[in-house]
Amino acid sequence: MCGFVGMVSNGPVAATLLVALQSIQHRGQDAAGLGTRVGPRFHLVKGMGLVSQAVPTHAVEGWDGTAGIAHVRYPTAGAISTSEDAQPFLTRRPGILLAHNGNVTNVPELRQDLASAGLHVLSHCDAEPIMLVLAQELTALRPARHTAADLVKAVRAVFHRVRGAYSVVALLEVDGQETLVCFRDPHGIRPGVYGQGGDGAWMAASESVALDVAGLRLVGDIPPGQLLLLRAGQPALLLPVVPAQPRRCVFERIYFARPDSVMVDGRVNRTRWRMGRELAREWAAKGLQADLVVAVPDTSRPAAMAMAEELGLKNREGFIKNRYSGRTFIMPDAASRTAALRLKLNPISEIFEGQRVILVDDSIVRGATMGRIVEMLRQLKPKAIHVAIFAPPVRHPCFYGIDMPTADELAAAAWPADQVEARLCAMLGADSLSYLSVQAMRRVVGAPLCDACFTGDYVVPVSAEERAAILAERRA
């Protein structure tokens, strides 16, 4: 999973891009980069770590480019993450700066096709093949001075050759003008929005919060299957490329996006609230009883509040989250893993002692973290721990940009669907486990969705060879 911000303006954009990029830091903490275009030249800086580490403010001071792209990366493809894999990517012929969010499923095939034409993919990142395919298709039409019509043909070829899920933002000269080029695959699985400033500036980003911090007005989603051309001081130009078949990712709404982001189906916070309300109704139908509701911070807070309101229970903050602990790395033994969890989440004992608690979270993937949370809370002597997940069971790996493990590592995939709650509840040591049903989730978000991680219904077919390649990289 990744996040991008692209901007075109009448003035320098580097400082604004840097601020906007920090608003979507949650979408990737492994690497970051920022590039701008100054006439025929490009400035580019990228590296490993958080935005403040990979793109320090002093590195972009004095950059006068009026168009640029910035990116944060969390690798879902590539066994090794290095600074060479950081985005955006740059090709000198015909001069393209490009970044994307998503996951390309046929990278080996693209590498082979490109190599046969003398174009070599040097990184482990799937944004580079997208860029090289686009460059190859454009230069096949003409070497330079590309038009919007050329771009439509080239992007149509990208849609035909590149499989998977991808939202792309690129910077190049089109019709003799500096242009921010945006497109999403015909299914629009990964998000992308764009907005306008009062000074004629345009911005495209993975989430609307990037527009908010930059002071731009949200216009809408980048339409799937279309080409969006943005130029400073000019109206946005939308060009049809292929028919769209939208299947937006539901896991963005459940877990990944910031709650204050706005997507095509509304604000994420509202969606999570409605999921919590639906879960409360399904939970109550089981005849269970509780005294209070506690969220596992931070994503599940809206759902927990909605559950408490719907059930007429108290909603309490039961954990203090250490916001400086960073990512939880794999620890060598159970004791160190428990210590790492305690560093990140410290429970408030008096909230849990003697209480029947509904513990609300967004998902269970491997089950190890939730198991350690339940084990930690048992020491505080609650009367009961009822685990409630405001999403269906994750039973299938994602191949479209969410870094989920192989099926044999997914806790809910170990048993038949009708046994998952009971068997996993016993494994976790909870008193009950309740998932939101697929039907309730779809009532909230509406159709059409990509919910393959829950249902196994993959929007873009992934061949056995492609699955094997992707899973081999993840295992590595």
Image (cartoon, rainbow, N blue to C red):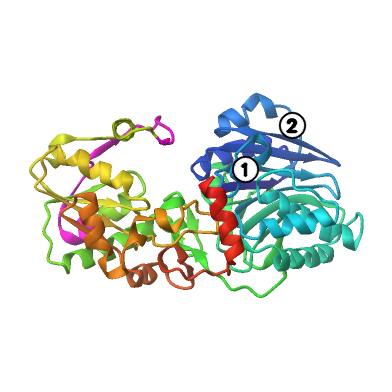
Q: Which three-letter amino acid code belongs to the residue tagged 2?
A: Trp
Residue found 74% across the figure and 31% down from its top: 63
User: Magenta residues?
Assistant: 306-330
312 and 252: which is toward the camera: 252
Q: Which three-letter amino acid code belongs to the residue tagged 1?
A: His
The residue under label 1 is: 71
Q: Where is residue 114 in the image (x, y as percent from the top left)?
A: 79, 56
Q: Where is residue 171 in the image (x, y as percent from the top left)?
A: 75, 49
Q: Which residue is at the far top?
A: 58
Lower position in the chain sequence, tag 2 or tag 1: 2
Q: In this view, does 101 lie to the left or right of 248?
A: right
Residue found 56% across the figure and 32% down from its top: 49
10 Å crowding of disc 2: few (<14), some (14-19), many (20+): some
87 and 182: which is toward the camera: 87
Residue found 58% across the figure and 42% down from its top: 72
Q: Is residue 318 left or right of residue 246?
A: left
Residue 467 highlighted magenta (yes or no): no
Kindly report the distance in space between the C-alpha atoms of the residues bearing marks 2 and 1: 17 Å
Q: In which quarter of the image is residue 432?
A: bottom left
Q: Position of residue 386 (x, y in %)?
A: 18, 54
Vertical relation: 186 (above or below) 209:
below
- Element at label 2: loop
Q: Single out the mark in the foreground, 2 or 1.
A: 1
The residue under label 2 is: 63
Q: In which quarter of the image is the C terminus?
A: top right
- Is residue 138 visible in this depiction of the protein? yes
Residue 309 highlighted magenta (yes or no): yes
- Element at label 1: strand
